[in-house]
Image (spheres, rainbow, N blue to C red):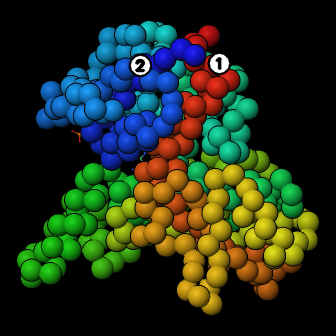
Amino acid sequence: MKNFVFAIVGALGNVGEEVLKILEESDLPIKNIILMDVGHNIGKKIFWREKEYTVFESKPDGFLGADIAIMSAGSEASKELSPKAVNFGCVVIDNSTAFRMSSEHPLVIPEVNAYELENHCGIIANPNCSTIQMLVVLNPIHRKYKIERVVVSTYQAVSGSGIAGKNELKKQIDAFSTGKKIISSVYPHQIALNVIPHIDFFLENGYSKEEMKMILETAKILDPNIKITATTVRVPVITSHSESLNIQTKESFEINDIKTLLANSPGIKLEDNPEKNIYPLPLNSSGKDEVFVGRIRQDFSANNAMNMWCVSDNLRKGAALNAVQIAKEIIHRKLVRVP
Ligand SMILES: NC(=O)c1ccc[n+]([C@@H]2O[C@H](COP(=O)([O-])OP(=O)(O)OC[C@H]3O[C@@H](n4cnc5c(N)ncnc54)[C@H](OP(=O)(O)O)[C@@H]3O)[C@@H](O)[C@H]2O)c1
């Protein structure tokens, strides 16, 4: 089998570092990695699979010789650099919003719609972190019982706002415990000891951009006929997003069959024993690959309705792991080529 060259852009960010960790642990045939970032990160040294690598400035000719690029540097960098990487014959897997809603670019969660990769034109989009974990859970339920409506509320970790979000929470906790002034610069309000129902910016329709991402991406990836509404909330948790899901189906179901179905579906781990205080928690999910699901119960207020709680590491399945799984799929399907 061919050995591949991976380029990681935004290599020293939250997601980039997680990509490097996952690639290091993986059994992928990797010949070389090219690390790119900006500013003070240029020239830094990284040890990866016991070899030292230097971080270079991100620029188009940095992709020379790369087979697969994983972009984790924000949408402006993706828009500028991804087409240039493709010109160098490199397949791009993009973590930003830049290409997610374009009809030309597949938006892929391998457990849900890996087949969409067959038609890629060089750039593959990785969905939003909150969408990924939700759809890993909704997909098997939809296939068997046909979902009609979903109401989702999220409880999203600060690492979803990059390194800056993590630093803000840590500094505010420190300031609170030492009696110093609390300063907010990443979020519009103090995030320590608070929850903020505001992720990304607000649109004219009253929804936040994050809420609309969940709605529109579900239509593109799973089924445009599913009615879905979302409320997205930032909470003072470092890593792992939590979601409350209320799901209504066309077909009737037994709640134990839903538990069995989810327990046997790819990428999901059932943690559902409330009597023993067992249910998914962000602290337990961080650093793990699965989407954890629990508190599965009938919703007695509507026909064919259920509630559940799902938690997943936003930097792993929500970003880096999903991107590496896409890389594995395109290698396996012999799709590492630019049409
Ligand atoms: N965090 C999540 O949960 C999550 C989930 C899904 C998707 N994503 C997406 O993944 C991307 C990265 O997120 P993150 O959380 O890793 O952010 P981050 O921690 O801020 O990391 C981004 C990294 O990219 C660097 N960078 C900025 N502009 C660049 C450029 N033109 N070329 C190369 N590197 C550049 C940044 O450097 P500076 O720090 O010097 O600016 C930083 O090292 C974003 O598009 C984000 O929307 C994040």
Mark 1 falls on what kind of element? Answer: loop
Percent x, y of residue 152: 62, 67
Q: Residue 288 carries which label?
A: none
Instruction: Identify which amino acid the numbered label 2 is placed on.
Output: Lys
Identify which residue is drawn at 63% across, 19% down: 335
- In this picture, residue 97 sits left or right of residue 46: right
Percent x, y of residue 60: 34, 14
Identify which residue is drawn at 13% across, 74% down: 175
Q: Mark 1 points at which residue?
A: 334
Q: How crowded is mark 1: few (under 14 residues within 10 Å), some or many (20 or more)?
A: few
Q: Which corner quadrant of the image does residue 106 belong to?
A: top right
Residue 74 in view here: no
The mark that comes first in sequence, 1 or 2, is 2
| Numbered disc total | 2
- In this picture, residue 80 sits left or right of residue 241: left
Where is the N terminus found, in terms of image quarters?
top right
Instruction: Identify which amino acid the numbered label 1 is placed on.
Output: Lys
Q: Quadrant of ligand 1?
A: top left
Q: Decide which of 304, 54 is in the foreground and name it.
A: 54
Tell me how far mark 1 sits from mark 2, CA to CA: 17 Å
**Residue at the front extreme, as displayed:** 50
Q: Residue 31 carries which label?
A: 2
Residue 204 drawn above or below residue 119 = below
Q: Which corner quadrant of the image does residue 17 belong to?
A: top left
Residue 185 in view here: yes
Residue 225 drawn above or below residue 261 = above
